[in-house]
Image: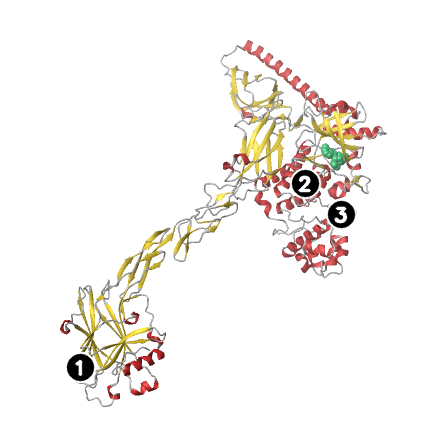
Amino acid sequence: MDCKPRAKPLLLCIFLFILSFICPALLIIHPSNEVNLLDSKASQGELGWISYPSHGWEEISGVDEHYTPIRTFQVCNVMEYSQNNWLRTNWIPRQSAKKIYVELKFTLRDCNSIPLVLGTCKETFNLLYLETDEDQGSRFREHQFSKIDTIAADESFTQMDLGDRILKLNTEVREVGPVTKKGFYLAFQDVGACVALVSVRVYFKMCPFIVRNLASFPDTVPMDSHSLVEVKGSCVNHSKEQEPPRMYCSTEGEWLVPIGKCLCNVGYEERGSSCQACRAGFYKSLLGNVQCSKCPPHSFTHHEGALHCGCEKNYFRADGDPPSTACTRPPSAPRNVISVINETSVILDWSWPEDTGGRKDVTFTVLCKLCRPGQRVCEACRSNVRFLPRAAGLQNTTVTVGDLLAHTNYTFEIEAQNGVSQLAPTMRQYAAVTITTNQAAPSPVTVIRKDRTSRNSISLSWLEPERPNGIILDYEVKYYEKQEQETSYTILRSKGCNVTLSGLKADTSYLLQIRARTAAGYGASSRSFEFETSPDSFSISSESSQVVLIAISSAAAIILLTVLLYIVIGRFCGYRRSKHPDEKRLHFGNGHLRLPGIRTYVDPHTYEDPSQAVHEFAKELDASCIAIDKVVGAGEFGEVCSGRLRLPSKKENCVAIKTLKAGYTDKQRRDFLSEASIMGQFDHPNIIRLEGVVTRSKPVMIVTEYMENGSLDSFLRKHDAQFTGIQLVGMLRGIASGMKYLSDMGYVHRDLAARNILVNSNLVCKVSDFGLSRVLEDDPEAAYTTRGGKIPIRWTAPEAISYRKFTSASDAWSYGIVLWEVMSYGERPYWEMSNQDVIKAVDEGYRLPPPMDCPATLYQLMLDCWQKERNNRPKFEQIVSILDKLIRNPGSLKITANTSPRPANLLLDRSSSEVVQSLGTMGDWLDNVRTLPCKEAFSGVSYSSCDTLPKTSAEDLKKVGVTIVGPQKNIVSSIKALESHSKNAPVPV
Ligand code: AMP
C-alpha cells in the first residue's frame, strides 16, 4: 500500500487498506448497456482533479483487493470551523449522452464517534456540475456550478468499525439531464465532513448493438425523457426481410418489443445469429429459417450454398417435382403380359413393372401395330381401333382393344411411363405381345337401296358390311309383310349384293333385314328397312281377271309345291348335315324357319369309318415338314414331343407332336385319331389348335400348336402365389371362353380339369384333351364307378357320376373345380380324401372351402357351379361375363371369401350349425375334414378346441410338422372358413 506521507489522511489510508481486503464488491463489472464517461478507478496515475483550497480534498493512491492501484480523494477537517472544500473533476466530454449518471462510492465518519469535535462536524457533502462546450483548464468559479444533490451517507462508520474491520461503504447514484453542451465538470463540496471518495463513475445508458431475429440493431442512446426510441434493424448478410424488423430502446438502455424478422436466403441456414451457406451435400431451396437438408436419394451437390441437388446420371426430376424428392428414373417394362382374344378384340393384362423408377405416377400406354404377312416392319394400327378405357395414361394394368381386323397379326407394345419418362427417351422400355385375331362374324349391312319397285316385286341392292371380317359367302334376306308382324316370313339367300323380291302383294308395306355370312357364321342382322310395292293402278275386265285368277292360282300351287319340296329336302339335309359341320341344321320351330348360325360339333363316332372323319376335319401333313426336337410329356398312346412345322410358303411354327407308339391296335389308332377329328372341328383362341395329322406314314402323329408352359396344374404349382388376382381371372376367363365355345357347339368335354388345360408363353389357357373313350380311359384321375364307367370323380358332377348324365352343366361343375384348382395354385381337390368319401361328402351337400385369399366373388362362382340341381349352375356364357366384369372392375377381387360376411361352406358341412356344434375338438374337426396326415400331426399339441383354430397360421402348422403345402393350405383355409362360419348364421349349400 502506497500512502502519501501525510499525517491527516492517515485515518483514511488505514481505512482503505482495510477496505481493499474486505470488499471485493468494489470492483463492479458494469452492465454492458452503460457507457462510462469517467471512471476514477480505471485511472492508474494521478487523476489531477482540482482542490480549492489546496488543503481541502487530498488525492491518495491505494490498491484494491487485486492490488490494482486506485486513486481516491478524502477530506476530514472536522476539527476546524467554516469548511468549504471543493474538488472539481477534469472536463468530461459528453459524447452522445443525453442524460448522465453519477455513481459515487464513499465512506463517511460518524461525527459522534470522533472524540473532541467542536460541533462543526458534518455528515454530508454536495455534488454539483457545470456544463461547458470546452475544457476551461484550471479556471474555477464556485458560483458557476449547479447543485445536483446533497449526498448523505446511509451508513457512517465509527472507530469501532475500524477495529472490527467492518466497512460501511455508501453507493449513491444521481441522474443529471438533459445535458446538451459538449462536456461538463463535476464538483464535490465538503462543508466539514470526514469523507473518502473511493470511486467516481460517470456514465450514460445505451441500448447496445444486438442481432435479434437475424436483424442487427446499432448502439442506440435512449431519450432523456421516459419515451422509447424506435429503431429499425437491418437484415444480416444472406438474409431477407420477411417483415421489417424493429425494436424499441428504453431509457434504461434495454431493447424492448422485437417486431418483424429476417429469413436466411435460399442456400443459407441460420447458425448462431447469422446465415451460413449450406455445406456440400446439403441444400436449402426455401427462404426461411429452416436448416439445410441432406440431398435426397440419387442427387448430390459438390459446392456450398446449394439451392437444390443435381440428379445422378440416369436419374431425373420431373417439372413438378419439389427439390426435396429423390431423383427418379423411367420404370422398367410391364411384366407377364397376357392376352385374351375374343374374335376381333383382345383383352391385354399385365403386371406392374418390377421397378417403378421410384415414382408413384406410373401409367401405361399401349401401342398397336398391325403386322402384315411378309412385311418385316409392322405398321401403326388404323385410328378406328378402339381402346377401352383408352390407349394412353392407363392407371390399371388392363385394356381391351376392339375393332381389330379378323385373322390378322398384331403386336401390342405396352409401355410403363412415369413423370420422368419424357426426359429419358432412350431409357424407355416396353413389353410386347403378338397376337393373331380370330375369325369374326361380319358387321351388319347398313346401306340398302331400293332399285326398282313394281306391283309385286322389289329390287334391292346394298353395300358390303363395313367390316366383312373374312370372305362373305352369301347374304340372307329375310322379309315379311309389315302388318303380319313377323309371324310368317320368307328367307332368300343371295351371293351378291342385290336381290329381287317377287311374288309380293301390290300396294303393301314389307319389312326386310339382311345379314352376311362368312366362314365364321352369320353376322348381326341389319336394322329393318321398309319398302312398299306399287299400287294396283289399273282395273281389269272380268275376262282378264279370270285369266289373272287362274295365273295366280297356278302360281300359288307352284309355290306351295316348291315350299313342300323345300321342307322335305330341308329335313333330309338336316339329317345329313348333322354329319357335316360346315353345313347348317335347319330347324322348324313354331312353324318358322330358324338358322342358328353356329357350327355344331359332329361326333366322329357317327361316321361309319372314323378315318373319314379325320380326313374331313384334319389336314394331312407331310411328315417331311415336321422336325421333332424333344420329348415334353407322355400321353396314353405314346410320347408328346415339341418340334417345328414348316408348311410350304408359310413361316416355321413351334408345334407339339403326339405320336402313336408302335404296335398299336386298330382300335387304338381310331381312338388316337379321334382326338384330331374332334379338335379339328374347333377354331377358338382358347381351344388347342390342330395343325394337322400324319396318317399316311409312320409314326402316326397329331400336330397341334405348342404351349410353352405345359399343363395348367403343374404350371400353377411351379409358380405358387406368383400371379395377381387379375392374371388368374384372365386365365380363368380364357378357359371359360373356350368352354362356352365348346358348349355352343354342343360338345361336352367330360374331363375338364387343370391338368387338361395347356398354357402358352403369354399365359393364355387353352382347353385340350379331347377324345372319345380315351377321354376318361386316358386320365389317371378317372376311376371306375359302380356302373362300370371310368370317371375323374373329384372333377365330376354328381349326376354324371351317378347316372352318366354328362352335359354342359356337368362341365360347369368341373369348371368350378378348375376354378378352385387355379385359385389354390394347383392344390388337389379334396386333398387326400378317398374317391368314395368325396362322392359321399358331395352328395351330402358338403363343398370345398375357399382357397386361401380367394376373392369372395370367385368362391361364390365356384359354389354356383357346384349347385346340386344342374339347371341352377351358371352357363359358360354367364361365367365369361362374370369374369369379364371382374376384369373390368379389379377392385371387386379385394374382398376375400375368408373375410367376406357370407358364411363359407365348409367341406363336409352338412348343416352349418350342426357342424359348429359337433366340431368340439380339433380331433373331431380333423376327422370331419378328413385331412388325416394333418390330424396325426396335430395330436399331441395344444390345439384342442375350435376356438383356438382361427389363430392358427401356416407358420403354426409348420411347427407341428405339417409341412406338405396341400394340407397346410387346406387346414388354414378351413380354419378361416370355420372362423367366418362360426361368426355368421349358417346358410345351407
Ligand atoms: P396329353 O396326352 O394331351 O395329356 O399330353 C401329355 C402331356 O404332354 C401334357 O401333360 C403336357 O405336358 C404335354 N403336352 C401335350 N400337348 C401339348 C402342347 N400342345 N404343348 C405343350 N405340351 C403339351
**Mark 2 vs mark 3: which is more N-terminal?**
3
* Image quadrant in which you'd find residue 2: bottom left
Q: Is residue 321 above or below residue 367?
A: below
- Left or right: 287 in relation to 660: left
Beta carbon of the mark 3 residue lies under 8 A of ligand 1: no
**Mark 1 vs mark 2: which is more N-terminal?**
1
Mark 3, residue position:
838
Q: Secondary structure at mark 3?
A: helix
* Image quadrant in which you'd find residue 810: top right
Mark 1 neighbour class, 10 Å CA radius: few under 14, some 14 to 19, many 20 or more: many
Q: Amino acid at mark 3?
A: Val
User: Disc count in the image?
Assistant: 3
Q: Which mark is residue 871?
A: 2
**Relative depth, front residue between 226 and 204:** 204
* Image quadrant in which you'd find residue 559: top right
Q: Is disc 1 in contact with disc 3, using a CB cutoff of under 8 Å?
A: no
